[in-house]
Amino acid sequence: MQLKDKVAIVTGGASGLGRATVERLFAEGARVAIFDLNEEQGKSLASTLGAGAMACTVNVTDDDSIAAGIEQVMQQFGAIHICVNCAGRGGGATKTLGKGGRFPMKLFRDVININLVGTFSVLSQAAEKMAANEPGKDGERGVIINTSSIAAYDGQKGQVAYAASKGGLISLTLPVARDLAYYGIRIVTIAPGVFETPLLGVMAPEVKQGLARDIPFPARLGAVTEFALLAQHVVENIYLNGETIRLDAALRMS
């Protein structure tokens, strides 16, 4: 799918991986809707980009909030061709059983609800709109990109909720690809390694250096622009479907 004049929604689009993706898709000619809970950051980015960008205050754990955001996009841009899900949260460094007791079930449910359930709600509602698009010359109507994590494969101590939520995204990729093939809608999941995002912004430089030390090559944290570049390629390469791509410089977490 060529990006020019297509319409994309990006959840978590006001910062980090989502913001870089918004900027990349917009620069390549797409109209972009920024879905984010942070209304101020979302509107600021949309204003910076100008015509062809819009911000919607969306809570991905609320089906009605998602539906309202999608309706805003349909009213302003008339269609949805691309959905990139970057909204999510960390799981807290909490063990299944530790000195403080058991893993709190409220935290477990919250992480699953945001990272897994929220992502599925967004992609399913977006797919419903994509199915109404006029197909391209090879029958394509839409592209969905989800953001997992290498924690889905290499979850570390204290990552049980986060790893479970991100593993769920990998597991649903192929069934969703099969479900949506009839409509000409593709889905690909990206599993990033350790990236330079606001989540890591509070870490001391020596801590970041320690994280980078275990990365084979290049031995540094990933740049958000590299995630965005892969997202662009997924959109443009029609033969990518039903797959999860690790973007981690060969890192395997111990």
Image: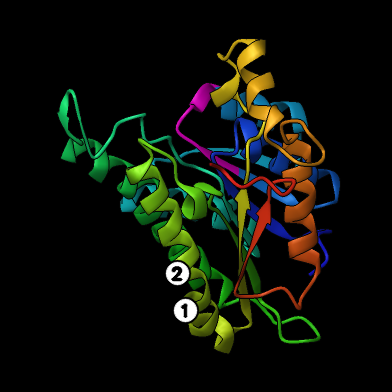
Front residue of 73 and 202: 202
User: Would you identify the image quadrant in which residue 34 lies?
Assistant: top right
Does residue 82 sit above or below 184 in this rendering? above
Does residue 237 sit above or below 226 in this rendering? below
Front residue of 51 and 176: 176
Does residue 199 sit above or below 155 in this rendering? above
Front residue of 184 and 232: 232
Residue 172 marker:
2
Q: Amino acid at mark 2?
A: Leu
Q: Is residue 35 magenta?
A: yes
Q: Amino acid at mark 1?
A: Pro
Answer whether residue 143 is visible to the viewer in this image.
Answer: yes
Residue extending farthest to the left is: 101
Task: Give, as a single range, the part of the protein colored magenta.
Answer: 34-40
Q: Which residue is mark 1?
A: 175
Q: Residue at x 66, y 75 (%)?
A: 241
User: Would you identify the image quadrant in which residue 82 lies?
Assistant: bottom right
